[in-house]
Image: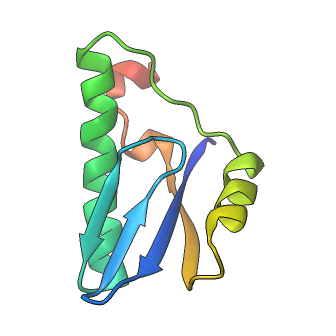
Amino acid sequence: MEKYLIVVEKSETGYSAYSPDVLGCIATGKSIDKTLANMKAALALHLRAFIEDGEEIPQPRGIQSYLDAERDSAREEYFNMHIVAASVLPERVLA
C-alpha cells in the first residue's frame, strides 16, 4: 500500500501541511484535523490534474521522503503523517 508523506507544521494561525512527494501541494487549517482534511482534498486535486494533463503521477518515495523532511525541518516543530494513495486517486487509475 503506497502512502504519500504529509509534513504538518505549526504556524502562527494554526497549521500548514505539504507533501514532499507532490511539489506545490500544500494546505492549511486551524486544527491538525482540518489541515489533514484540507491536505487530502488538495492532494486529490493535484493528482487528478496530473491525470487530466496527461502527466505521470508522482510516486511516493517511501523512507527517502521521511529522511528529506527530517533534514529540511531546520529543527522546527513538525509532525509526519501519511495519506494512502488509493484514498485520493480516481478509481480508473487504480484499476
Task: Give the vertical position of 39 relative to 23 (above or below).
Answer: below
Give the position of the C terminus as an image quadrant.
top left
Task: Give the vertical position of 92 relative to 16 (above or below).
Answer: above
Q: In which quarter of the image is residue 68?
A: bottom right
Question: Quick check: 18 left or right of 54?
Answer: right
Q: Residue at x 67, y 50 (%)?
A: 65
Task: Give the vertical position of 74 relative to 17 (above or below).
Answer: below
Residue 13, percent from left and from top: 24, 88
Give the position of the N terminus as an image quadrant.
top right
Which of 66/36 is in front?
A: 66
Q: In which quarter of the image is residue 35?
A: bottom left
Question: Quick check: 49 left or right of 61?
Answer: left
Q: Which residue is drawn at 51% across and 66% down?
A: 7
Question: Quick check: 88 left or right of 4?
Answer: left
Which of 5/72 is in front?
A: 72
Q: Which residue is drawn at 70% across and 67% down?
A: 70
Residue 42, percent from left and from top: 27, 50
